Image (cartoon, rainbow, N blue to C red):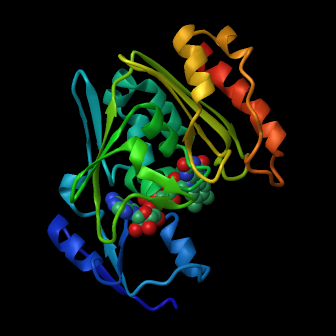
Amino acid sequence: MKNFNYHSTTNTKEAVKLASGKGVFLAGGMTLLPAIKLRLAAYSNLINIKKIKGLTGIKVSSKSLRIGATTTHAEVAASKEVGKSIPSLAVLAEGIGDPQVRNRGTIGGSIANNDPAADYPSACLALNATIHTSKRKIPTDKFFKGMFETDLKKGELIETVEFEVPEKSAYAKFANPASRYAVVGVYVAKLKKEVRVAVTGVESFVFRCKKLEDALTHNFSPSAIDNVTISSKGFNADIHASAEYRAHIIKVMAKKAVSSC
Ligand SMILES: Cc1cc2nc3c(=O)[nH]c(=O)nc-3n(C[C@H](O)[C@H](O)[C@H](O)COP(=O)(O)OP(=O)(O)OC[C@H]3O[C@@H](n4cnc5c(N)ncnc54)[C@H](O)[C@@H]3O)c2cc1C
């Protein structure tokens, strides 16, 4: 069904109220609209959240970087604040899709959608992000639940994503040459208290790689990765890469990321 009511609001409360029935938030529309067009999804109400002022923008403090949910990938890529405090995040945003996608797609839409090959979920996990919603604060380790599945409840709106500012970090992606989605993406972050490594494109949803985290906690250098064995069990296998190839590329991307930290 392609028939739906279109709502546009400047108010968070109204957006949440409208979405609590059979409604869905519309941000950049880069995923939602193709899904509706292909009849993979149908909704009675689309609620455009792009005009809600408080949902956009970037704020930095010494400890954290907060990005509003409707901030586009292009805005993150071009932001001086992001470039200064977490440059790897600007690199990630610059590598998403193409200019059209980067100018429409938003960080909130990306993490709410939780595509198995999306880039931002790996940044959230590696940078120990907190997802601020209309109802609560969700620690990133509890946010991503499964393929296209998150901890968000019906009508719960992501307002801001708060990243911990790391001592060092980098993102390396082996990209699908057509879509630029990750065949394998590895985000490495050396935080004040821990090293976190998040992998996207490889399983049904983003995950932390404990073996790499342990090796890099002991010795934060590319050579520390040499002796790590990554099993391909449960990894995606498709026309782009076998499970074994993905397992190999995780190490290659992890080394690349650590080298560029
Ligand atoms: C050709 C193409 C190439 C792409 N390449 C890449 C790539 O290389 N890497 C990558 O990571 N991504 C890629 N994407 C995805 C893109 O970057 C968008 O981030 C993604 O499509 C969703 O963001 P959006 O703002 O368009 O959300 P929408 O399509 O508007 O919404 C997606 C979902 O999120 C929900 N939602 C949106 N905002 C919120 C919110 N604030 N709170 C709660 N729920 C919300 C919507 O209700 C919907 O269910 C690509 C997309 C296309 C079409």
Using the rendered image of the protein, determine whether residue 98 is visible from the camera's viewpoint: no
What residue sits 23% from the left and 71% below the top? 16
- Above-or-below relation of 224 to 114: above
Query: Residue 202 appears in which quarter of the rendering?
Result: top right
The picture places residue 222, in percent across and down from the top left corner, at: 65, 12
What residue sits 59% from the left and 32% below the top? 209
* Left or right relative to 150: residue 156: left
How many dots with numbers?
A: 0
- Above-or-below relation of 34 to 175: below
What residue sits 32% from the left and 52% below the top? 69
* Left or right relative to 134: residue 115: right
The picture places residue 3, in percent across and down from the top left corner, at: 45, 92
What residue sits 62% from the left and 50% below the top? 117
Using the rendered image of the protein, determine whether residue 120 is visible from the camera's viewpoint: yes
Q: Closest to the observer: 139 or 127? A: 139
Q: Closest to the observer: 203 or 13? A: 203
Query: Residue 57 appears in which quarter of the rendering?
Result: top left
- Above-or-below relation of 232 to 5: above
Q: Closest to the observer: 171 or 177? A: 171
* Left or right relative to 69: residue 255: right
The picture places residue 204, in percent across and down from the top left corner, at: 63, 54
